[in-house]
Each structure stands twice: as structure tokens, then as C-alpha cells.
Amino acid sequence: MSLLDRFLPVALLLGSNVFMTFAWYGHLRYKSAPLLTVILASWGIAFFEYTLQVPANRLGSAVYSAPQLKGMQEVITLLVFAGFSAWYLGQPLKWNHWAGFALIVAAAWLIFLD
């Protein structure tokens, strides 16, 4: 397996998670926007998330198992969300959030053990 085979799925998952995080949480800055508007906007953003996520899992399945891909995706999601929460939402994570996320990272690490 080449480095590209190993890291392209990770890069695609990273990109898809940026779109996913905006689709799921970006509307929280616009609480006065009508709910239907933010639902439709989120679906539009989610389209781009899927255009990266599906190839990430398809290509990644040649290198990683499905549980490994899911564990990797969860860790990437947490990292993207941590930055997004602080930067975009102005809600930096507290110690207990980091501690909870660390437990999830530990669980994902276990998935990669033989």
C-alpha cells in the first residue's frame, strides 16, 4: 500500500467532516433564520459532504476495515468540531468536553489494535 492509499481516505474524510460540521451546526449562528431555510441549506451543504465521504470510505476500504474507517471518522469529526466550535460558534471546549473526547479517541485507538 502506498502513502496515497493510506492518506487519501483520511484527507477526504477531513474535507467531508468540514462540510458535515457546517451542515449540522453552522445554522446555530443564524437562529432567526426560518427552520425550513436552514434545513434546505444544510441539505445542500450535506451534498458536498457526501461527495467526499462516499469516495473516502470506498477507497479507504481497500486499506482499512469498516470499523477502522468509522473510528477514524469519529476522531476527525471531534477535531473538526473542536475547531469549529471555538472559531465559528465562539464556544471553546471546556476541560470536560476534552476529557470526553479523549475517551472517544481512546476507543477509536482500540479499534486499530490487532
Image (cartoon, rainbow, N blue to C red):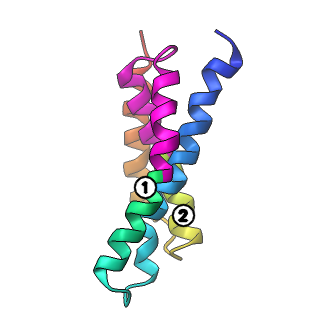
Decide: few, some or many residues near mark 2? Use Cα within 10 Å; few <14, some 14-19, many ≥20.
some
Q: Quadrant of the C terminus?
A: top left
Asked whether 83 falls inside the magenta stretch, the response is no
Residue 28, horizontal then vertical, whole percent: 40, 77
Residue 65, horizontal then vertical, whole percent: 40, 17
Residue receiving disc 1 = 46
Q: Which mark is residue 84?
A: 2
Q: Is residue 18 left or right of residue 33?
A: right
Q: Residue at x 32, y 85 (%)?
A: 34
**Which of the 4 quarters of the picture holds residue 106?**
top left
Residue 3, horizontal then vertical, whole percent: 70, 18
- Residue 72 seen in the current view: yes
Asked whether 57 falls inside the magenta stretch, the response is yes
Magenta span: helix, strand or loop, mainly?
A: helix
SS assignment at label 2 = helix
Q: Which residues are drawn in magenta?
A: 48-76
